[in-house]
Amino acid sequence: MIHPSNPLDRPVTVSAIVVCYNEEERIGACLESIRWCDEIVVVDSFSTDRTPEICRRYTERFIQRKWAGYRDQKAYAHSQATQDWVLLIDSDERVTTELQQEISDALRRDKGAYAGYSVPRLVRYLHRWWWRGGWYPDYDVRLFRRVRATWGGSDPHEKILVDGKVRRLKHHLEHYSYRNIDDHIQRINRFTSISSQELKKEGCRWRLSDALLRPPVRFFRSYIIKRGFLEGFAGFYIALTAAVYVFLKYAKLWELEVEEKKKIDRPRR
C-alpha cells in the first residue's frame, strides 16, 4: 500500500478485515471503500442472500464460518490477516478518501511509533449525520499492528487491546448503522439480550437502582449534554431509545435472575 521514498525500506502493508451476514445492500460499498488495502479478509456467517457473490468480486480471501459471537468472530478474522497492519471495518461502514489518506500518511510518518490508531465514527441515520446526540466522535481502535493486538470486552461491545501506544486520527469512518427505525428497534432487542447475558456471566447482580437511575441519566446525557435537542424530534427519539436500551438491559438481567431462582426452587420429584 505505502511505498517509502527510500526504496530499501520495506513497504508498510495493510489487511482489512470484515465480518458479515446477509449484507447484500451494504457490503459492496464497504468493500469498495477499502480496495486500496493490500489484502481484504471477509468472514461470512453463511449468508443466504447475494453477500458471498458480491464479496468474491473484491477478494479471494472469502471465508465462511459459523457465527461465534462478535468478539470471537472478529478475533478469527484477525487471525486470518497476513499483513503488517490490520484495519477493522464493519459491513455498514465506509472508509472515506480523507481517512484513507490520513492512514497512509500516519503509517509512513510515524514509522512504528504507535501500535494502534483510534478512529472517530460518524453515524448516518434518519436522513442526517449525527454530530450531536452522543454518537460522535465515538473513538474506537480500528487500525493496529497485527502481532500487537488481542481481543477483549464482552459481546456485543468487543474491543481491541493493543500492546503499545495508540494515537487518535482526525478523519472519520462513515457509519450507516441502522436501515430504519424497525431495524434499530430489532437491534436494541437483540443487543440488550446479549448484554444482559454477558452481565450475568461476569457476576453482575440486578439492582433496582440501576433500572431506575441509569436510563434517565442516559437520556439527559444524550438529549441535553450532547445537544440532541438541536435535532428536533429525531434527537428526542435517539435519546429515548438510548434510555430504553439501558432499561431493557437491566430488565432482562432481572428476568434471568428470576428464571434462575425458579430453577433452584423447583421441587425435585
Image: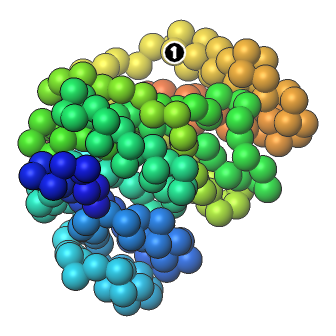
> What's the coloring here?
rainbow
Q: Which residue is mark 1?
A: 210
Measuring from the top left, give residue 215's x and y in whole percent: 63, 22
Relative side of 214 to 12, left or right: right
The quadrant where residue 266 appears: top left
Q: Nearer the viewer, residue 55 or 260?
A: 55
Q: Is residue 268 above or below residue 23?
A: above
Query: In which quadrant of the rendered image does the C terminus lie?
Result: top left
Relative side of 66 to 119, left or right: left
Measuring from the top left, give residue 87's x and y in whole percent: 31, 51
Q: Within 10 angstroms of label 1, few (less than 14), some, or many (20 or more) residues?
A: some
Query: In which quadrant of the rendered image does the N terminus lie?
Result: bottom left
The quadrant where residue 39 appears: bottom left
Query: Residue, x 78% and y 50% (percent of image)?
Result: 128
Q: Is residue 192 above or below residue 125?
A: above
Measuring from the top left, give residue 254's x and y in whole percent: 43, 28
Q: For the residue labelled by badge 1, is the local secondary structure a helix, a strand or a loop?
A: helix
What's under tag 1, amino acid-wise?
A: Asp
Measuring from the top left, give residue 12's x and y in whole percent: 20, 51
Q: Nearer the viewer, residue 210 or 225?
A: 225
